[in-house]
Amino acid sequence: MPFTLRDLVADTGLGLGVRAGERALDRPIAWVHTSELADPAPFLEGGELLLTTGLTLRAEDCGGLVDRLTSVGAAGLGFGVGLSHRAVPAELVAAAESAGLPLLEVPRPTPFIAISKAVSHAVAAEEYAILRRTSRAQHELAQAAGTTNGVNALVRKLARLLDAWVLLLDSGGRLLHSAPVGAGARLGELVSEVDKMRAKRGLAAAGFSLGDQEVSMQALGGRARGFLVVGRDGPFATTDHHVINSAASLLTLALEQVEALGAARRRLRSGFLELMLRGEPVQDVLGDLHAELPPEPFRVVVLRGARDQDELLAGLVADQPSAPVYLAEHGDEVVGLVAEDALDWLTDQSGLAVGVSEPSTAVGLAEGLRQAEQAARAARRGDAVVRFADLAGRGVLDLVPDCDAQAFAEAVLAPLRDQDVLVKSLQAWLAHHGQWDPAANRLGVHRHTLRNRMHKVEELLGRSLDQPGVRAELWLALQVLDRPEA
């Protein structure tokens, strides 16, 4: 505990008397300073016990001296009697009592240096005690971190050392560990504070109140790999903050190791996926990666459009259900092999284009991946999730990006721009498979008129309408221009 004015007064060898401010004697003393200046405030930092004999102090100056000491947060005033003043001035006693400033009477036999030594020894002893408590706590935390499941053990140890509740959150603010277990229920109350710290990015710390709880929060590491939240009744002492900082450092190292190990495992998963695509048997070694293939037949799922593939993959691995799911990177996409009953979990990813294959096996993995990739390309142009089987029911236009289809159509029909009659005649003729009479009847013109119009179309296009490929291109272009805008 900090050394206080009450502790100093209790030292009978000093013979100090309390003349005012007795209710504030529990103030800690940071240091002792001696001064006979009329205004010693500029030389104080706060928390000091000022000692003076009042060499230049007049009765009318007492109130001003007390006000100045109070304004800088002095712990108290010690007044030496028997030299400049036979007794503590009544005006000084009144002013100190009114301001709540502890006023101690120092008897003539007690030298100021004795008070300084007493405080110095007490402060040194307190600092040594803090150092020992911090060192002991750091040692216990380091031991916990070195055990199996060290991160969880470290969190529990920190909670016991501080008699507090502790939450460890990942970089997204999701709960990783809590001590006691029920402390995880507090996460909902912390969302706004976590969001503030996430917005700061990098190293950051904050202290705030949560109801009747005092809370300390720290970002772990320069990349904010996670957040350490500690809360309890009452404020945290200096020793407590040292312990929290030590735990934060150990957790940062632990999370870095976990992250590095996870990244290595993800790279191995991706490498094994490539081997499986080549037909290599690797199932026997997947267990060493804490990974296994789902039972056959499974679905191949391709996820495209993630800003950070590694972050997406790490999040999926951390959140995957108990059912076997094989996840890996492949080129610029994340690939998942998943059983039908876990399919919804993997495909429910907002902001991504997701393609799903037909039921596949390890032997047919390459074909399953091709199907999923083709479906994902279609999903990029509209639906968030597309199954390969759904592609069969889509028109040709759904397989072509809108911007590409529009550019194609405008280029093919450019010679017929502003020729609405010719365009409508061409559309009717193609719709009736080049049969003159039905097309002419549809337009309400003679078949010879329609023939003349088609000859004009051929002249403008510079292409023969007798070629099936030309007819197909023109029909596709007309369909693009005729379809409604999304």
Image (cartoon, rainbow, N blue to C red):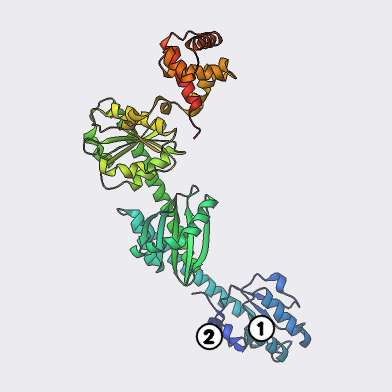
Q: Amino acid at mark 1?
A: Ala
Residue 389 image-quadrant placement: top left
| The one of 89 and 484 positioned closer to us in this rendering | 484
Mark 1 to mark 2 CA distance (whole Å): 23 Å
Q: Is residue 81 visible?
A: no
Q: Amino acid at mark 2?
A: Ala
| Residue of label 2 | 10
Residue at the image position 44 percent from the left and 32 percent from the top: 381
| The one of 86 and 475 positioned closer to us in this rendering | 475
On the image, the x and y values in percent for residue 456 come to 54, 10
Position of residue 113 relative to residue 230, above or below, is below
Q: Is residue 15 left or right of residue 246?
A: right
Position of residue 17 relative to residue 281, above or below, is below
Residue at the image position 55 percent from the left and 52 percent from the top: 200
Q: Is residue 124 visible?
A: yes
Residue at the image position 27 percent from the left and 29 percent from the top: 365
Q: Is residue 409 left or right of residue 367?
A: right
Q: Is residue 32 left or right of residue 297?
A: right
Position of residue 131 relative to residue 18, above or below, is above
Foreground disc of the pair 1, 2: 1
| Residue of label 1 | 99
Residue 162 image-quadrant placement: bottom left
